[in-house]
Amino acid sequence: MSNTINIDGQTIPFQEGQTIIEAATAAGVYIPHLCHKPGYTPHGSCKLCTVNVNGRNCSACTFPAAEGQNIINNSRELTHDRQKITQMLFVEGNHLCPSCEKTGNCQLQAVAYQLNMVDNHFPHFYPHREMDASHPDILLDHNRCIFCNLCVRASAEKDGKNVFAISGRGINKHLIVNSASGKLKDSAIDINDCAAHVCPTGAILIKRTGYQVPIGQRIYDHQSISTVALTQEQEHGE
Amino acid sequence: MKNFIQTVLAEAEYQPTRLLQILRAVQTQYQHIPAEAIVYLAEMLNIPKTRIIAVIEFYSFFHLTPQGRYDILISDSITDLMLGKENIINYLSAVLDVKVGQLSKDGLVSLNNTSCTGICDQGPAALINGYPVPRLDREKIDEIATLIFQQMPVTEWPSHLLVVADNIKKSGLLLNNLITSGSSLTASLTRGLPDTLDELEQSGLRGRGGAGFKTATKWRLCAEENSDQHFVVCNADEGEPGTFKDRVLLNSFADQVFEGMTLCAFTIGARQGFLYLRGEYLYLKHKLEFILQQRRANGLLGKNILQQGFDFDIEICLGAGAYICGEESALIESLEGKPGIPRNRPPYPVSQGFLNKPTVVNNVETFFAAAAIAVNGGAWFAQVGTEKSAGSKILSISGDCESPGIYEYAFGTPIRTILNECGAKQVLGVQIGGPSGVFISNQELDRKLAFEDLATGGSFIVFDETRNIFDIVKNFTHFFAHESCGFCTPCRVGTSLLKNRFDKIVEGHGSAGDVVELELLSKLVKNQSHCGLGQTAANPILTTLERYPELYQQQLKKISYEPGFDLDAALDVARRMAHRNDSAAHLIQVED
């Protein structure tokens, strides 16, 4: 194996065409992320996976691994910045973890645990965002959308339907639905679509499944997202 | 409506990449993009309806709800504010009986702010149905109001209202040595294209948009990419507040700019080029089309150029009010008919640009200079300037000076010389490179115009000692929050947090902790953002915090913590509901 990169002093092999995060995951190194998911076109928007490559900050999910890269992933500075970026995601929307039925299964919440986020730090925006409960099986709560684009990509790339898009500019960004009424019930989405299950937060929920697993027995109640992500994403790679 | 849209679509050859042009036509016809039009366009272009809505909601000049038959936008750039913009917009609002941000009851007029019209040397300026109206005063407003009430089309208004001057105050290497049409192509073909690229290399020309990448290297890299198609794009999305030199170059020397693009096309093997013109310069389009037509007639564009077997043509594409489209990859997205969101890099445009084909994107001034270098040679250009910054730079100077306008200086010129020549007195500081650049104080006027010291795309805004630093920083900070594309978290949320925190301090509600937080947040947004907008959005705050820490301190309350909201004011609704306003119904927020 001649192709290697170095992450925090550890030599890691990579294959031509792999991104840094792909090489890291295969080698069991966790880089925090929300908008990245193996098998989906990289997006690079959440910025949690920012690593320092030879002195420059780059998104590990989009930046190609290349020979001679000296990468810092675990540093005090990066952890601090990742925590602040996560706090930004919390104050931008309306995230009320204790009353959200996704609690314990939510990647945003789990990343916050991982980064030792104990408060929201920034002043809240308290935006007015609506809920779309029109669909018989799927609930869309805009309050928790973090614009990771995974539902957009899932619908376009996996389901071939283009149900979702992100519209607007700047802080006014919002998720929109491709249907005559703009409501989920009139769209082509189906409960079995990838787009219905890919949301890393509680923005897209499957109805009538909320408390089937009791709080306290959920994914991130006992395991860190680093362990869960590495297990799931390595499996995907194999 | 379907008939109209059919005509528009036919003109755009049913190409989804031309979505911005299509929407522009619909917006002009109906003063907004009607829901019915969106459904029909989605069907006819075979694209999701959501893509059309995403484009409409991304660009400032597109609207889902009707605007006035006279849509008035007032430039909110700092230079317009310094020239009395607030007074002008209030007067307009009164005379036309329409509130800012609203549509008049009869649907005749809508009045709004816009980030910058690119006429900073002739403010306060407006765009009315896309046409620029510079140097507004009360007299002109009265005249405009009469024309509007008579419902006279803007195209028929007296020309003295609509004339934008070039204001070229000082010519240098390039403006003194304009080339004749076709001469750079003939010279290059005589010399040979590889040798011409060598001359360009020798000239040391670096991109004039601000980043300063070596032009010859960019062209060479693009030429070496193996592809069935290559593209040339001229970035005329001059959105940096305080910059207007590209407007002047296109107004008076477009032929030389097109020649530079054609030269680039020869070098890299492109058959198609685009001039991406910012929406605010719509009024130049007709003139530019005419010049392109002339070049075609003279055998300098189109099929078999100069009988040498080269085919190349240029299409003009208009933006729709988004500063971010000046970023080259966002510009390419916009050219493809999408929201202007900067791409992830690598790949870079030279290998995967327009339609993922190798593309050279250069600034207007870069192509203008390249054409002159092809005629006069690399040494001619390199003899001027400094070691790392060859040649000259065309500047747009505005703000507090006697003669705002266009100035061309050799690189290496001290800022003091430039200020003296434009008639700047009692200078407080200069914003170099626009809001995304650097604010230098009057202690730094011996610094030099050069990539190795003060690099700039060309915007110089002069402030004299009567100006308040906070007014300037506030304008810039709000500008960035408004123009952030919102793609990445640190910029989308961070620019708005910066705006709110800065306002809190300036409005007198800040404590020591707020300044610390402002600085930390600025650094985070700078270091973690996806593209140049976010990476520079905090510059106005960081550069003034560094130079004027005492000014920030003076704004602060002498307590350790001050909340971001007024608790007592928040109780106002409760007091009204309870019909009481006694002292016990009020709260003192923080005690020392």
Image (cartoon, coloured by chain):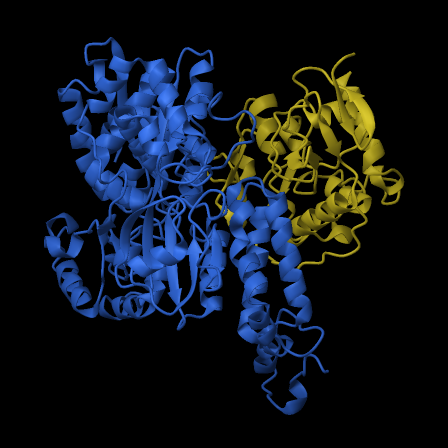
Q: Is residue A55 left or right of residue B196?
A: right
Palette colour of chain B: blue
Whether residue B99 appears in this view of the structure is no
Name the one closer to the observer, B66 or B533. Answer: B533
Q: Quadrant of the N terminus of chain B?
A: top left
Question: Which hue is chain A drawn in?
Answer: yellow
Residue B178: percent from left, percent from top: 21, 34
Please give left or right for residue A16 compared with residue B338 in the image. Answer: right
Q: Is residue A34 left or right of residue B81?
A: right
Residue B129 appears at what percent x and percent y? 24, 49
Quarter assignment of residue B87: bottom left
Q: Quadrant of residue A15?
A: top right
- Residue B433 visible (yes or no): yes
Q: Nearer the viewer, residue B488 or B476?
A: B476
Q: Is residue B357 left or right of residue B86?
A: right
Image point (58%, 23%), residue name: A157
Q: Residue at x 16, y 26 (%)?
A: B293
Counting from the top left corner in percent of width and height, residue A116 is at 81, 49
Of B452 and B365, which appears nearest the observer? B452
| Residue at 46% across, 11% down | B226
- Quadrant housing the C terminus of chain B: bottom right
Asked which quadrant contains residue B171, the reply is top left
Q: Is residue B68 above or below residue A27?
A: below
Q: Residue at x 88, y 44 (%)?
A: A216
